[in-house]
Image (cartoon, rainbow, N blue to C red):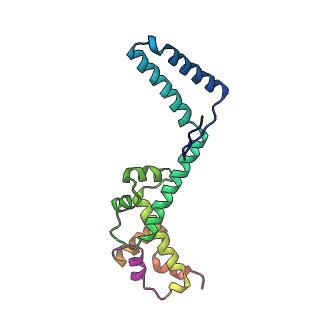
Amino acid sequence: MTRQNGGYSTQLGAEEFHYLRTLIDHYVAQAPQVTPMMSTVGSQMIIASLGEVLLNSETLTRSRKASKLRNVLAIKSYISRHLHESQLTGQMIADHTRLSVNYMNRLLAEEGLSLMKLVWQLRFEESRRLLQKPLANNLQLAEIAWQCGFSSQSHFSQAFRRYFGMTPKEMRAQRPH
C-alpha cells in the first residue's frame, strides 16, 4: 500500500493484503443489500484495519522518530540561542517552536528531562564551558552568570554549586592552563 506525494509507504504482508482485499471486495459486493447501519460498521472496519496497518508501518515509525528528533533539536537550538534571557519561559519556547509546552515535556521525558530542567542543564553546561575556556579568563563571574541567563551572581553561584558540587571559582581554578 503506497500513499504518494510526500506521504508514507508500507508493505503489506500477503496475509494482511488478502484480508483487506477480501474485506473490501465483500463490502463492495454487498453494498446494495446492506442497511445503512451495517454499511457504517463495514466502513469503520475497513478504516480501522487500514489504520492499524499504516500506524504500525516501519516507515511511519521511522518518520515519527525523525520528527521527534527534529523537534528536540529545535527546542535545544532555541534554548541555546536564548540562554542569556533570564526570563526565558516554556511558553516563549513553545511560541517559537510551535509546539505545546505539554508536548515538549512529553518529548523530553523520554530523555529524563522536563523543558525547564533542560533550560537549566544547558545554562549550567554553558557556564562550565565559559569557566573552563582560557579565552574567557577575563570574564567576571557576574558576566558569565548574566550570559547564561542567571538573574544574579549570587543565584548563579548557589545553583552552580548544587549542580556541580563546587563553586564557579573552584571550577575555573581546575581548568587546564
Residue name at image x 35 percent, y 66 percent: 88
x, y percentage for residue 110? Answer: 50, 50
Picture quarter with the C terminus:
bottom right
Q: Which residues are magenta?
A: 138-151
Task: Please state if 137 lies on the left or on the right of 157 as rendered.
Answer: right
Q: Is residue 91 magenta?
A: no
| Furthest residue toward bottom | 138
Picture quarter with the N terminus:
top right
Task: Please state if 92 lies on the left or on the right of 74 as rendered.
Answer: left
Residue name at image x 52 percent, y 75 percent: 129
Residue name at image x 45 percent, y 86 percent: 139
Q: Nearer the viewer, residue 145 or 48?
A: 48
| Furthest residue toward top | 33
x, y percentage for residue 14? Answer: 67, 26
Residue name at image x 50 percent, y 84 percent: 136
Task: Please state if 96 lies on the left or on the right of 29 as rendered.
Answer: left
x, y percentage for residue 161? Answer: 44, 71
| Furthest residue toward front | 32
x, y percentage for residue 20? Answer: 57, 24
Q: Note whether 43 is above or below 142 in the view shown.
A: above
Q: Note whether 57 is above or below 147 in the view shown.
A: above
Q: Nearer the viewer, residue 99 or 15?
A: 15
Q: Note whether 72 is above or below 133 in the view shown.
A: above
Q: Note whether 51 is above or below 38 in the view shown.
A: below
Q: Is residue 144 magenta?
A: yes
Label tally: 0
